[in-house]
Image: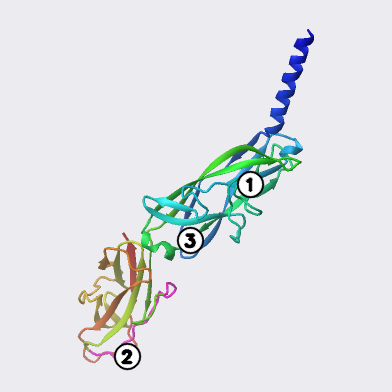
Amino acid sequence: MIKLYLTLIYLFFNLSSAWGQYCGYYFTSSNFVAEIGTSEQSVAHPLRLWSFSNSNNCRNARMYFSRGNANNYSRKAFSGSKTVAYNLYKETALNNILKDFGDAGTNEYIDFRINRRFTFYDIDFFVKVVDLDSVFSNGPGYYNDLIEVKLYSVRANGQEVYQTSTYINIQIIIPRYAELSLGPMGSPHDPSSTQHIMSFGNLSTGKTAQAALNVKSTVSFGVYMSSLNGSVLKKGASEIPYTINVNQAGHRSLTNPGQSYYITQRNISTPVNYEVFPIEARIGTMPSNPDTGEYSDVITVTVTPW
């Protein structure tokens, strides 16, 4: 009987010791998805943590982040042989790269204090998403990486005890993207410049006016135009016809008011700066004795990525 009693006590203490190291953490995260834009982004993403244990040894949690498929801390997302650089940071200012257990120094992991068990906590880390120009030559696509986030409890004596892991798929999208600008010939591309006045001065048959359509696109695209008045300049009831020529493709009329006409296309992406499409408007046959004053029309230009 004494031997049996001692054996039961031994098993009880072994069980208690194992339970003391296990905090009963629930630890998870959704997958991360971001679309690359025209400027660099710092995007917050949450980890969710919940604790079963009320032990002081489970109050402090520490999170470490794996290297990903690049196997270093210049992290990359992959689409076949193409890559997009990104990284994981502790703060929105993107100062401290998050690293794995054994590699991380001060400020290269996330600490979190659990004040109450049975309570969900969301802890943010930050993903640096690069700007479009830096990956423009890649073309559109979906780029992926897989990150393991390891969760440790930090005991009262400072000892770190591994608890569990969660995995996050990092997906970064290069979009099918096109933008345009309008201005005088020779003007640089400025996506905020989407209006331009083509002035003929004093009108006469065959007189021309020019403008530049600048397009920046990651894919092939088509150019379309519509005319408010149907390719005529108007002043009241008086009308003066004109034709339009884009990229030296030949003059044509935008005959039906408001109808969108296919004008030209480019079958590959543009250079990272932009591609210039010269626009020329030419006055048709002037009517005899037209009313004096200003004549106008409005042309809408649309660039559609394919």
For the N terminus, the image quarter is: top right
Toward the viewer: 155 or 220?
Answer: 155
Rendered location of residue 246, percent (x, y): 26, 75
Q: Which residue is mark 3?
A: 130
Is label 3 or label 2 in front?
A: 3
Toward the viewer: 60 or 52?
Answer: 60
Q: Secondary structure at mark 2?
A: loop
Question: Which residue, as the protein is rendered here, is positioned at the far top?
Answer: 1
**Residue occupying the point 49% across, 53% down:** 75
Asked if residue 241 is positioned above or below residue 269 in the image, the reply reads below
Majority secondary structure of the magenta segment?
loop
Write the start and end of the magenta stretch as one range. 190-204
For the C terminus, the image quarter is: bottom left
Is label 2 or label 1 in front?
A: 1
**Residue occupying the point 27% across, 74% down:** 230
Rendered location of residue 87, percent (x, y): 52, 55
- Distance from label 3 to label 2 (Cα)? 46 Å
* Label disc, if present, on residue 201 of the rendered structure: 2
Q: Is residue 59 magenta?
A: no
Asked if residue 195 is positioned above or below residue 141 in the image, the reply reads below
Q: Which residue is mark 1?
A: 122
Q: Quadrant of residue 6?
A: top right
Q: Counting other residues with Cα less than 10 Å from the Cα at mark 3, is it few (<14), some (14-19), or many (20 or more)?
A: many
Toward the viewer: 109 or 193?
Answer: 109
Q: Is residue 200 magenta?
A: yes
Residue type beneath disc 2? Gly
